[in-house]
Amino acid sequence: MAKLSNKEGRELLEAGIIDQETFDKMLEAGKIGAGRQGGARKPKRVFEGTNVSPQLYFKGAKNVEPTEAMEACRKEITSIIEKYTVLAD
């Protein structure tokens, strides 16, 4: 059985094909993706006249709860990105 995206799983849930308990079990078993880890997409930014999309991810940290150190690193990098770029129009 192929892994469903979180969106596909939610569509099945909303259509009444599966119930919440089944959805939760499938999510826990890894049959449904966990969804976006970083929340909503961030707006595009501009660096020296060029649209850029700076990103941070921790390679190999799939299905790992973020630690305090990871969150602190993410906040620091976000502040650096904001310092050197501006929001695109």
Image: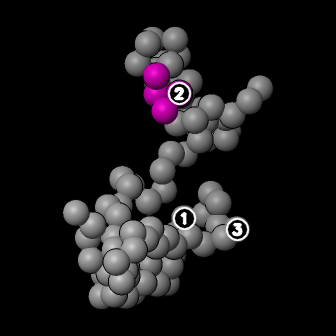
Q: Residues within 10 Å of mark 1 (few under 14, many from 20)?
A: few
Would you name the residue on which mark 2 appears? 8
Residue placed most toward the observer, 18 or 73: 73
Q: Can residue 10 be found in the magenta stretch?
A: yes
Q: Name the image quarter holding the N terminus.
A: top right
Q: Is residue 74 visible?
A: yes
Which marked residue is nearer to the observer: mark 2 or mark 1? Answer: 2
Tag 2–tag 1 contact (CB < 8 Å): no
Q: Amino acid at mark 3?
A: Gly
- The answer to whether 29 is drawn above or below residue 36 in the figure is above
Residue placed most toward the observer, 87 or 58: 87
- The part of the chain drawn in magenta is 7-11
Q: Name the image quarter holding the C terminus.
A: bottom left
Q: Earlier in the sequence, mark 2 or mark 1?
A: 2
For the point 38% across and 55% down, which residue is it? 41
Would you name the residue on which mark 1 appears? 65
Q: Amino acid at mark 1?
A: Glu
Q: Position of residue 79 (x, y in %)?
A: 33, 84
For the point 70% across and 68% down, which residue is it? 60
Would you name the residue on which mark 3 appears? 60
For the point 27% across and 67% down, which residue is it? 88
Which secondary structure type mostly characterizes the magenta part of the structure? helix
Q: Secondary structure at mark 3?
A: loop
Which marked residue is nearer to the observer: mark 1 or mark 3? Answer: 3
Q: Can residue 84 be found in the magenta stretch?
A: no
Tag 1–tag 3 contact (CB < 8 Å): no
Looking at the image, residue 28 sits to the left or right of residue 44; the answer is right
Label 2, label 1: how far apart the Cα atoms are: 23 Å
